[in-house]
Amino acid sequence: MAHVLVIGGGVAGAATALLAARQGHTAELFERDTRAPGTALDRDFFGWRRPTVPQAAQPHALLGAARTVLRDELPDVYAEMLRLGARERHELDWFDVRPPELPGDEGLVMLQARRIVLESALATALRAEPGVVVRYGEPVTGLTTAGTSRTSRTSRTARRFRSSRSFRSRRLRSRTRPPGSTSRE
Ligand SMILES: Cc1cc2nc3c(=O)[nH]c(=O)nc-3n(C[C@H](O)[C@H](O)[C@H](O)COP(=O)(O)OP(=O)(O)OC[C@H]3O[C@@H](n4cnc5c(N)ncnc54)[C@H](O)[C@@H]3O)c2cc1C
């Protein structure tokens, strides 16, 4: 089992940390924003200035494949989205006359919501996940790999990470470094 470091707590990062923990790994997520998505959706949607995630103000539609993955792999997140008001719509409902049904068409369902609904559902699941530590307000500005003598541009977080968790991070670096690779920023 690995200790997985995730940089960025958007939808991809949050889902990655969650899925890693549920596969038996531990995960540590670094997010530059100091604020976490909450369950007060209107407050977050209208009152949270998010220059690093400008699309947060946009509605989002998860197409059929993404909805299927979410429903199968993170059913609690899927259920929470529906509870918070996400709506489902079969993609073939756009047609005035539905085309003849084909096998698999039942999966062509879009899940639509404000993006904060998905973020809030993921954040709720992360908070309940014992294998995940989420570090808000901790940007990562560089990475180092094992064997490097250069101190590349790293954040306070990354430096602290190396010093306070040296054994674990050494292990992680040695696992993630491809054979023959050199350090790079
Ligand atoms: C206008 C618009 C509409 C869209 N509509 C849809 C849609 O309808 N359906 C759909 O599926 N997709 C849609 N997308 C795409 C979707 O928003 C992105 O695919 C998705 O947000 C990517 O998720 P992410 O987690 O990779 O990045 P983001 O959600 O952008 O999150 C990145 C996170 O990383 C953090 N971060 C960045 N740098 C650092 C750092 N150095 N250290 C720590 N944290 C950091 C940021 O603060 C942010 O929280 C849309 C995108 C746009 C722009």
Image (cartoon, grey):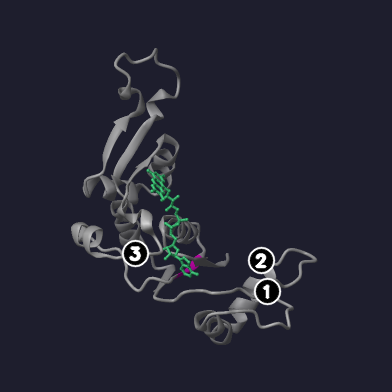
Query: What x and y, as percent, mark residue 26?
Result: 49, 67
Three-letter residue code for mark 3: Arg
Secondary element at tag 2 = helix
Q: CA distance from mark 1 to mark 3?
A: 31 Å
**Based on the displayed image, in which of its 4 quarters is residue 92 positioned?**
top left
183 or 29: nearer the eye?
183
Answer with mark 2 or mark 3, whichever residue precedes in sequence: 3
Q: CA distance from mark 2 to mark 3?
A: 31 Å
Residue under label 3: 50
Answer with mark 2 or mark 1, whichever residue precedes in sequence: 1
Q: CA distance from mark 2 to mark 1?
A: 8 Å
Three-letter residue code for mark 2: Thr
Q: Which of label 1 and label 3 is nearer to you? A: 3
Please tell me the numbered disc located at residue 108: none
Q: Does the residue at mark 2 contact the one at mark 1 (Cβ under 8 Å)?
A: yes
Label 3: how many Cα within 10 Å (few below 14, some 14–19, many 20+): some
**Based on the displayed image, in which of its 4 quarters is residue 143 positioned?**
bottom right
In the image, residue 44 above or below residue 91: below
Secondary element at tag 3 = loop
Label 1: how many Cα within 10 Å (few below 14, some 14–19, many 20+): many
Residue under label 1: 145
Query: What x and y, as percent, mark residue 14?
Result: 42, 60
Residue at 50%, 61% in the rendered image: 24
Is 28 a magenta residue?
Answer: yes
